[in-house]
Amino acid sequence: MRRPLVAGNWKMHGSRDSVGTLLNGLMAQSVPETVDVAVCPTYVHLDQAVAACANSVIAVGAQDCWHAEPGAYTGDVAAVMLEELGCEWVILGHSERRSYHAEADALIAAKLQAAAAAGLKPIVCVGETLDQRESGEAEAVVARQLRGSLEGAVGTAGLVIAYEPVWAIGTGLTASPEQAQQMHAFIRKQLQDLGVDAQQTRILYGGSVKPGNAGELFAQDDIDGALVGGAALKAEDFNAIIAAA
Ligand code: PEP
């Protein structure tokens, strides 16, 4: 039995004020004992989130990390720094990093190894574009991303995969529960072939998850929670998604 995880990816949103309001809204509702919850604010709001979540079961994660030890890497943040700050999770290989920062699978694999070595639990994102789905390449793309991103790190403790079809991120389009389940089952099989403990590995769905569609997604056998973008910015919506898990 895999414990559901609901993680909020706040992307580049928020001010000290709005983040404070959001965190207060999350603290106002108790998290069911059966669900793990994490919030992933920008780097500059991590300390605020860590302080606010200190007496709660909500964990804090970063949206990325760099793969090297602390050193001459202007603008980057090392995995060990995030761990020292109190982060438990780190999102790696989000499609926005893959597209706006040209992150390739090999770099994501290096980040994954650094994150694991620092004691962070990684959420590795994979997913196809609309063109790739329409041309029948979705599974091949996801299999390639998994193979490349997990290279050298298949035994990582606490590894989580997030299937996020790029065409469903921030668009209001959601993969149907059947489409998502089909890809999640495929991912689980790929993980097994790669030597990952597939039955224990949580596979989250991400892409326009909202209170209205979370329940039917979570009802699928291989969907173990969600990585939530837009709806994670409203405490009421995020709390409702947690309640559905
Ligand atoms: C995301 O970017 O990880 C995401 C799932 O975004 P949204 O929920 O807004 O589609």
Image (tube, rainbow, N blue to C red):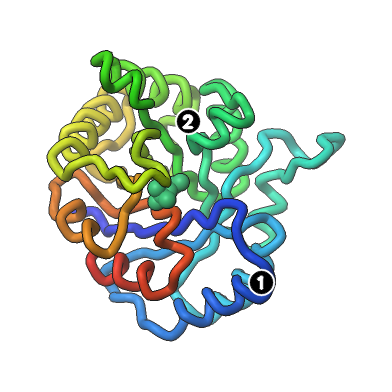
User: At 48% across and 34% down in the image, what residue appears?
Assistant: 95
Residue receiving disc 2: 153
The answer to whether mark 1 is within 8 Å of ligand 1 is: no
Displayed quadrant of residue 197: top left
Residue receiving disc 1: 48
In this view, the residue in front, 192 or 77, is 77
The answer to whether residue 192 of the structure is visible from this angle is yes
Distance between the alpha carbons at the discs numbered 1 and 2: 31 Å
Nearer the observer, disc 1 or disc 2? 1
| Residue 87, percent from left and from top | 59, 59
Residue furthest bottom as drawn: 28
What is the secondary structure assignment of the residue under circle 1? helix
Image position of 44 (left or right of 212)? right
Task: Please tell me whether residue 138 is drawn above or below residue 121 in the rendered image.
Answer: above
User: At 22% across and 47% down in the image, what residue appears?
Assistant: 223
What is the secondary structure assignment of the residue under circle 2? loop
| Residue 213, percent from left and from top | 22, 57
In which quadrant will I find the N terminus?
bottom left
Displayed quadrant of residue 132: top left
| Residue 163, percent from left and from top | 34, 38
Task: Please tell me whether residue 222 is drawn above or below residue 190 in the rendered image.
Answer: below
